[in-house]
Image (spheres, helix red, strand yellow):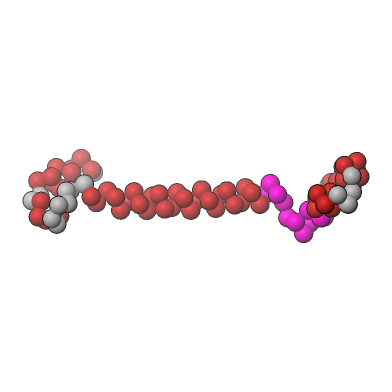
Amino acid sequence: MTTTILPALAAMPAHAWGPGYGPGWFILIPIFWILLIGFFIFFSRRMYWRHRIQGDPTSAEGVLRERYARGEIDETEYRQRLEVLRANRK
């Protein structure tokens, strides 16, 4: 399709596109929209991935993770409780 459009656009007089514009400027608008949609998809997937990795902070594992991070429990207690939580989930 573009092979049939481009010769026709090249044959048009330059004043049809406005002063100083060539027939290739029309490609900028689709590129803009493709980039905008691409950025939206990239950042939404990144936020989804980050949420999956970090988990829900209000869940039992999230609370346990926070307690371990604050130093309220040590590593062995954290691992034991995490094992119990994951065993009960099945």
On the rendered image, what quadrant is the N terminus found in?
A: top left
User: Which stretch is magenta?
Assistant: 52-64
Q: Position of residue 83 (x, y in %)?
A: 87, 43
Residue 60 lies in the magenta-colored region: yes
Question: At x 81% / y 49%, what residue is drawn?
Answer: 69
- Tell me, yes or no, if residue 38 can be seen here: yes
In the image, residue 70 above or below residue 2? below
Q: Main secondary structure of the magenta part?
A: helix
Q: Position of residue 3 (x, y in %)?
A: 20, 40
- Tell me, yes or no, if residue 89 can be seen here: no
Give 77 or 37, whichever is nearer the viewer. 77
Residue 34 lies in the magenta-colored region: no
Give the side of residue 7 with respect to residue 25, left or right: left
Give the side of residue 84 with respect to residue 2, left or right: right
Q: Position of residue 75 (x, y in %)?
A: 87, 42
Question: At x 9% / y 46%, what residue is drawn?
Answer: 11
Q: Position of residue 53 (x, y in %)?
A: 68, 46
Give the side of residue 15 with respect to residue 61, left or right: left
Question: At x 72% / y 51%, what residue is drawn?
Answer: 55
Question: At x 53% / y 51%, what residue is drawn?
Answer: 43
Extreme residue toward the bottom, this view: 58
